[in-house]
């Protein structure tokens, strides 16, 4: 599995610093995208066309030709991994690390800007970035005066409303009546305002605030905006099709300069815009020419990943979308025709799981690595059957998108301890650790500490210390809390003298947190201790505790252990940006893909996004793309008949090989007319055979059945004691009905 060209590519040879040799291995379109440095530029980079190479080389080209210094280029990516790879490649081309780069994700760059200008939004430069758990706890506290029915209006739902407002660049004051929500009995906007006020009091912000605050500063402070206009001579943006409204506003503010050209280069692919549910607006890329008059468009259409049949199938499918800028991928590989995309019909979802997993096993036997195979599903409910089958046949696999390292409970606790040391005003962190491990602090005591802090207008930890000093709380609980406060204070001293690694080791040990897990007898405890050790090891990669905490807030990457090759099982959304030799695409049925929700609510716009998702799925494959659809599927314990996805009819025949879809003749019974529609069995279309009804009343023509040896099949005929069954292998058997199980 790879995501882009490796830095050891000939493009990044040591001779690249001599003249323009670093441009030599580019195709004409890539070179045009790199050398068009003045004015706005949109690079439409199709799947596998080398957009990472173009972005990296363009950055280096601007530096090597003296057009800008490293700190005069703003380069924006969507993931920390992409930013890290880009930084490494730029250094490779230049022959030395590039220092002072403004290169990172939207949120990382905005966090850096906000540290500089925090006072304009009521914060200090040492503000804390809250995670989702802390956001929810804070929001629940803020909701209390409104007496909201949290069963009807749960806090996570309200937080989602607030985050959507932030994604659209709306401060509480900018939420108009039209944009308001009925959530929380119509109090959502007022609670949003109170939530933002409380964040400022805590000297904190949530993830959405990073972009919202900076965009608001740029909107309202012309002097600050002018600073960045003078600083950034060039702007580079990756994955522009995935930008939401606030990201779009931020980029426009930085790119549009009065009396000067907008040297902004956006790289993206409108055909791969699949994140509207996260706030992404495909319209941002579609209106680029309108936003930046005179913009040039360069299309990268040479795909260096997939075979021509795979590209042809994907191109034929996506051509059915109306809202697109248009491009046609062609293979840039020699002998690239390859095998056709296969479309296979199976009896049901269990048969689909067997077919897919057995095919993976055969590919493995032929020498293909499991690490280069992926099963890409549209929805989470599809995974169960595949997992069971993979376990049954002993194929190693991994579910991509599981619980991430920094989301584990013990890691969140440890991070809260660190935050309480780093930012004494972080009430949420202190609240999390004050009774972890148990120190006898119940709800009543905690409320008393909060009241003391509010009365003195100080942070919770300071109010707690004051109450203890005054004797307002006594007993064993008071002693335990006093010890915690002493540990936090001592840790701050150690942090200043000996550094953050030694300080955190002291903190976790002396607070009793490590002992809590050492004394825990649950099977999970040893693993939790190992995770905490790994957390402390990770600290060493950062210069300060603050840098580490900001890194954690910005980065939530799944950490895979090295080991045996494993087949990947993930959603289509999760697969974007990845590529595999062999891709299995199950569940191409109406109601599954496209999803039923899209069919019910999404309209044409939603259907086009589903089609883009199908396009993404097919173009993940380098050599083999295998599509499956089932005649019936078990959804929430019930078998339901399925119709093949409309997307299957949109695949061009010259690039597709269809299997088990034609009309089949068995004993004079035309299955395509009776129990098959489009080659697939439909349990809702059963014809009653008189003989079958008289002798074997438990079965009907068209029933799905299972035999212990031959597997799953469908009944096509019968006599007094026997059933004639056509099995998914294509074989027809006449078997005693007593050995047949009806599904």
Image (cartoon, rainbow, N blue to C red):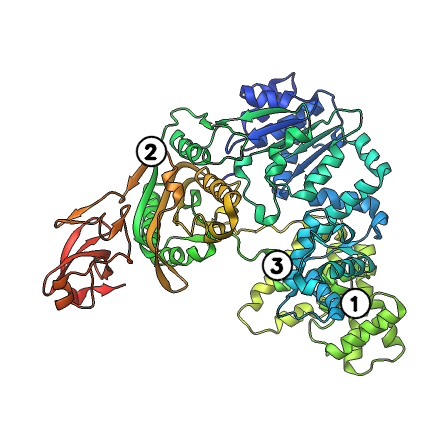
User: Where residue 239 appears, x then y in whole percent?
Assistant: 60, 37
Q: As displayed, is residue 374 above or below residue 619?
A: below
Q: Which mark is residue 407?
A: 3
Question: Which is more N-terminal, label 3 or label 1?
Answer: 3
Residue at point 32%, 41% (across, down)? 366
- Give the residue number, with chain letter if any, for mark 1: 487
Residue placed farthest to the bottom in the image? Answer: 475
Q: Nearer the viewer's eye, disc 1 or disc 3?
A: 3
Q: Residues within 10 Å of mark 1 (few under 14, many from 20)?
A: some
Q: In the figure, residue 117 lies in which quadrant?
A: top right
Relative to the observer, which residue lies in front, 13 or 86?
A: 86
Tell me which residue sits at (69%, 71%) in the image: 436
**Alpha carbon of mark 1 to alpha carbon of mark 3: how far?**
25 Å
User: From where the camera sits, is residue 611 visible?
Assistant: yes
Density class for disc 2 (Cα within 10 Å; few <14, some 14-19, many ≥20) is: some
Q: Position of residue 136 (x, y in %)?
A: 68, 63
Disc 3, SS: helix
Q: Label 1 to label 2, Cα distance in Å?
A: 70 Å
**From what the image shows, is residue 309 above or below residue 171?**
above
**Residue 274: x, y in percent?**
54, 43
Q: Secondary structure at mark 2?
A: helix
Badge 2 is on which residue?
653
Q: From the viewer's perspective, is the residue at label 1 or at label 2 nearer?
A: 2
Position of 514 with respect to 28 (left or right) is: right
* Quarter containing the C terminus: bottom left
Q: Earlier in the sequence, mark 1 or mark 2?
A: 1
Say whether residue 559 is left or right of residue 709.
right
Residue at 43% across, 42% down: 372
Label 3 neighbourhood size at 10 Å, few (<14), some (14-19), many (20+)? some
Of the pair 325 and 386, the residue shown nearer to us:
325
């Amino acid at each position: 599995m790879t995501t882009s060209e490796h830095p050891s590519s000939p493009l990044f040879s040591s001779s690249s610093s001599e003249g323009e040799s670093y441009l030599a291995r580019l195709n004409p379109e890539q070179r045009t995208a790199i050398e068009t440095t003045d004015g706005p530029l949109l690079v439409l980079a199709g799947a596998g066309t080398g957009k990472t190479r173009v972005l990296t080389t363009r950055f280096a080209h601007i530096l090597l030709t003296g057009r800008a210094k490293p700190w005069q280029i703003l380069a924006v990516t969507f993931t920390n991994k992409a930013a890290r790879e880009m930084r490494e490649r730029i250094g490779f081309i230049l022959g030395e690390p590039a220092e002072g780069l403004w290169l990172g994700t939207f949120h990382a760059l905005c966090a850096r800007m906000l540290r500089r200008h925090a006072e304009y939004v009521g914060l200090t430069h040492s503000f804390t970035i809250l995670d989702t758990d802390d956001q929810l706890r804070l929001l629940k506290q803020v909701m209390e005066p409104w007496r909201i029915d949290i069963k009807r209006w749960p806090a996570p739902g309200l937080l989602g409303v607030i985050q959507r407002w932030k994604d659209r660049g709306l401060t509480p004051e900018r939420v108009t009546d039209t944009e308001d929500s009925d959530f929380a009995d119509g109090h959502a906007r007022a609670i949003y305002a109170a939530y933002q006020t409380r964040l400022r009091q805590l000297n904190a912000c949530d993830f959405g605030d990073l972009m919202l605050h900076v965009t608001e500063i740029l909107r309202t402070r012309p002097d600050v905006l002018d600073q960045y206009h003078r600083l950034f001579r060039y702007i580079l943006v990756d994955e522009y099709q995935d930008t939401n409204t606030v990201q779009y506003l931020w980029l426009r503010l930085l790119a549009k300069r009065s009396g000067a050209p907008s040297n902004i280069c956006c790289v993206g692919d409108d055909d791969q815009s699949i994140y509207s549910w996260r706030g992404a607006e495909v319209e941002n890329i579609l209106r680029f020419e309108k936003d930046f008059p005179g913009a040039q468009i360069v299309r990268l259409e040479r795909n260096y990943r997939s075979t021509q049949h795979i590209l042809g199938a994907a191109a034929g499918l996506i051509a059915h979308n109306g809202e697109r800028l248009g491009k046609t991928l062609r293979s840039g590989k020699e002998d690239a025709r390859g095998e056709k995309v296969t479309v296979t019909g199976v009896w049901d979802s269990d048969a689909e799981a067997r077919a897919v997993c057995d095919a993976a096993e055969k590919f493995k036997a032929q020498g293909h690595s499991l690490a280069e195979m992926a099963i890409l599903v549209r929805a989470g409910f599809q995974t169960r059957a595949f997992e069971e089958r993979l376990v049954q046949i002993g194929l190693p696999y991994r579910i991509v998108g599981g619980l991430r390292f920094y989301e584990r409970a013990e890691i969140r606790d440890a991070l809260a301890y660190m935050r309480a040391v780093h930012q004494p005003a972080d009430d949420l962190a202190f609240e999390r650790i004050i009774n972890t491990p148990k120190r006898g602090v119940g709800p009543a005591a905690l409320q008393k500490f909060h009241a003391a802090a509010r009365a003195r207008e100080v942070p919770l930890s300071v109010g707690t210390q004051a109450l203890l000093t005054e004797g307002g709380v006594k007993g064993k609980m008071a002693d335990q809390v006093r010890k915690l406060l002493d540990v936090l204070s001592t840790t701050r001293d150690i942090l200043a003298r000996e550094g953050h690694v030694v300080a955190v080791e002291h903190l976790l040990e002396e607070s009793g947190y490590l002992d809590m897990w050492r004394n825990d007898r649950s099977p999970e405890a040893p693993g939790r201790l190992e995770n905490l050790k790994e957390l402390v090891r990770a600290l060493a990669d950062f210069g300060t505790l603050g840098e580490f905490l900001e890194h954690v807030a910005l980065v939530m990457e799944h950490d895979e252990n090295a080991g045996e090759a494993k087949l990947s099982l993930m959603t289509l959304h999760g697969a974007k940006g990845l590529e595999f030799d062999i891709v299995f695409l199950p569940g191409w049925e109406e109601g599954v893909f496209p999803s039923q929700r899209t069919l019910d609510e999404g309209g044409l716009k939603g259907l086009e996004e589903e089609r883009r998702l199908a396009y993404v799925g097919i173009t993940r494959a380098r050599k083999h793309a295998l599509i499956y659809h089932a005649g019936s599927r078990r959804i929430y314990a019930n078998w339901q008949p399925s119709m093949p996805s409309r997307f299957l009819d949109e695949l061009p025949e010259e690039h597709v090989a269809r299997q088990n879809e034609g009309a089949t003749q068995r004993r004079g019974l035309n299955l395509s007319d009776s129990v098959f529609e489009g080659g697939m069995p439909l349990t809702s279309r059963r014809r009653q055979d008189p003989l079958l009804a008289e002798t074997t009343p438990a079965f009907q023509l068209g029933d799905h059945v299972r035999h212990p040896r031959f597997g799953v099949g469908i009944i096509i005929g019968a006599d007094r004691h026997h059933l004639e069954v056509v099995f998914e292998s294509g074989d027809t058997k006449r078997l005693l009905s007593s050995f047949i199980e009806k599904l």
